[in-house]
Amino acid sequence: MILLNGERCELAGGETVLAALARLGLEGDARGVAVAVDGEVVPRARWASHPLAEGARVEVLTAMQGG
């Protein structure tokens, strides 16, 4: 279990940032997306290889346009 944007999310230990993004319906190549794990920004190049530990806090931010 991890916290994904403040909500409990069942992900197996060792799942990657990409798996967390998929839970939100986002692709790994989505534009305007930033990810932080336990307060540390994870570069896009590491999303596919960055494993999530049990209890990790994952924040996914998306840029929005408009005014």
Image: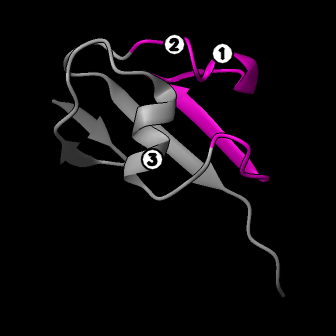
Give the image location of residue 1, x and y in percent.
15, 30
**Residue corresponding to mark 3:** 22
Contact between labelled residues 2 and 3, with CB atoms less than 8 Å apart: no
The earlier-in-sequence mark between 3 and 2 is 3
Q: Are marks 1 and 2 in contact (CB under 8 Å)?
A: yes
Q: How is the image coloured?
A: one colour
The residue singled out by tag 1 in the image is 46
Tell me the CA gap for discs 1 and 2: 6 Å
Amino acid type, mark 3: Ala
The mark closer to the camera, 3 or 2, is 3
**Residue farthest bottom in this picture:** 67
Q: Earlier in the sequence, mark 1 or mark 3?
A: 3
Q: Residue at x 79, y 52 (%)?
A: 31
Near-viewer residue (45 or 42)? 45
Q: 13 above or below 10? A: above
- The kind of residue on which mark 1 rests is Arg
Q: Position of residue 65 (x, y in %)?
A: 81, 76
Q: Which residues are magenta?
A: 28-51
